Amino acid sequence: MKIAVLGGGISGVALARQLAGDGHRVVVLERAERPGGLCKSRRYGEFTFDEAGGHILFSKDKRVLDWQLARCGGDAGTVRTERNTKIRWHDRWVPYPFENGVGHLTKEAIVDCIKGYVEAHVARRLGAPCPANFGDWIQWQMGDGFARHFMVPYNQKIWKCDLHQMASDWVAGRVPEAPIEDILRAAVGIDTEGYQHQSVFWFPKHGGFEALVRGTCDGGGFELVCGHRVQRVERRGDGFLVDGDTFDLVVNTVPLPQIESAIVDLPGEVRADIRALRPISLVNLMIGVELDEPLPQLSWIYLPFAEQGPTNRVTYFSNYSPHNAPAGHGSFLAEVTHRGDLRADAEWRRGVVQALGKAGILRPERVVLLESCDNEYAYIDQNLEFRARIQRVRSWFDHSGYLTFGRFGRYEYHNSDQCVARAMQVHEHVRELARTGTRAPLRLG
Ligand SMILES: Cc1cc2nc3c(=O)[nH]c(=O)nc-3n(C[C@H](O)[C@H](O)[C@H](O)COP(=O)(O)OP(=O)(O)OC[C@H]3O[C@@H](n4cnc5c(N)ncnc54)[C@H](O)[C@@H]3O)c2cc1C
């Protein structure tokens, strides 16, 4: 078959590589000057930075992790790190997850957290129903103290909205319930680990996270056309027409709102649903510093409070690979989310760095490089209407003959490993289609 893949982020190129391996003729059409999307990295002199915040190689799915590591050159091409993440809680460093770090808070805050946690625990045991909105869910799951001292300020900082307007279902599995015994142990100073998710991760030795994308394209056997913004897609007979070229199959991975106007045969109500889907955007500051001594062996830290400036997370990026910064230097990534209303000019960037200085993260006078990258499509706005809208949109695509997947190609809150896992599922679907010749609806578990 001749297959068009729209968008050359990790979803698009991972699928293209697999389809080309089956002997299909695959053309990836990518708007930017090079592939990678949110996985792109860039260089400034001897510094390398990721463009969309700190990325790590990690997967619960061993097949996917092995696939990703192989694209990055395996053990020889990657650095393995034991995760060490903390929360900057006022003037304290609290181990993450916060529940397991509770013993590091002030005594008053420990009492607030434990009292609230026990109350919430009892209320759940007495049958308090799981709230549909995220604001109430935090109280229901963690209680008032944890909510007030971390969860609410941190989440307000990242999502930039009233948390009661957000759905709660997307957190299931991302924030597992900590056993009450662990919390009590942590409160009296006995170390507890918390969930082991990402306790070890990998990062490409050279070239930043983008090395994953380059390793997927190299020898991938597909045609990659960059600088091509897809403008017009329509069904024509048994196949498709994409900007005047004929294809047997089209797979979209472009953010749906960025491809919607190009797809001629979208019904009006699906178009309206897509137009109502909102992204949360992300300005990523790339900071190079001169060092007198090595950076602390931290992976990343969370900054929940307004007085720490607008940054919600700082990655200690030169700890991921020694090749991310030149000798005698270190580097950070500082993530600031917004809803399309932020102008990251030089003065604003300097203000962010000053706030990080006050929070004790870095010394502003040692900063030798300060750049930023604005990523329009970074996080999914999980508002209460989101699920109904996206289900209608996915359902139309899955029965239309078009295939769509990807972080914003399907609006799934997925990391790159889950994008690769989805690419494997779509690959299987196309195999079946090629074998039987029937266009069955796409079913992604
Ligand atoms: C802050 C942050 C931290 C993250 N951390 C991690 C992490 O630690 N580990 C991890 O694995 N993942 C992480 N992720 C998630 C990861 O970045 C994404 O899951 C993944 O990059 C999504 O890939 P994609 O191909 O689906 O989409 P995208 O990367 O968005 O790719 C879509 C592509 O479509 C192109 N495009 C747009 N319009 C058009 C058009 N009209 N025609 C042609 N092309 C077009 C774009 O240029 C882009 O290249 C993180 C994401 C964020 C925002």
Image (cartoon, grey):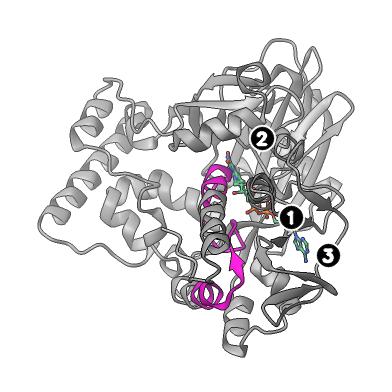
Look at discs 1 and 3 and give the one toward the viewer. 1
Residue topped by disc 1? 26
- Please, is residue 214 above or below residue 280 in the view? above
Q: Quadrant of the N terminus?
A: bottom right
Residue topped by disc 2? 356
Taking the image as shown, residue 228 lies to the left or right of residue 195, namely right
Between 342 and 215, the one nearer to me in the picture:
215
Look at discs 2 and 1 and give the one toward the viewer. 1
Q: Which residue is drawn at 74% across and 55% down?
A: 26
Highlighted range, magenta: 393-422
* Location of residue 267 in the rendering, given as x and y in whole percent from the top left corner: 61, 87
- Please, is residue 7 above or below residue 221 in the view? below
Q: Residue at x 64, y 48 (%)?
A: 22
* Location of residue 92 in the rendering, given as x and y in whole percent from the top left corner: 47, 27
Residue topped by disc 3? 229
Q: Kindly identify the amino acid type of the residue bearing the numbered disc 1.
A: Val
Element type at marker 3? loop
Q: Kindly identify the amino acid type of the residue bearing the numbered disc 2.
A: Leu
Local crowd at mark 1 within 10 Å, few (<14), some, or many (≥20)?
many
Dividing the picture into quarters, in which one does residue 323 lie? top right
Q: Disc 2 or 3, which lies upstream in sequence? A: 3
Measured Cα–Cα span from mark 2 to mark 3:
38 Å
Q: For the view shown, which residue lies furthest in the front direction? A: 436
- Please, is residue 4 above or below residue 15 in the view? below
Between 289 and 144, the one nearer to me in the picture:
289
Taking the image as shown, residue 111 lies to the left or right of residue 395, namely left
Q: Disc 1 or 3, which lies upstream in sequence? A: 1
Q: Is mark 3 within 8 Å of ligand 1?
A: yes
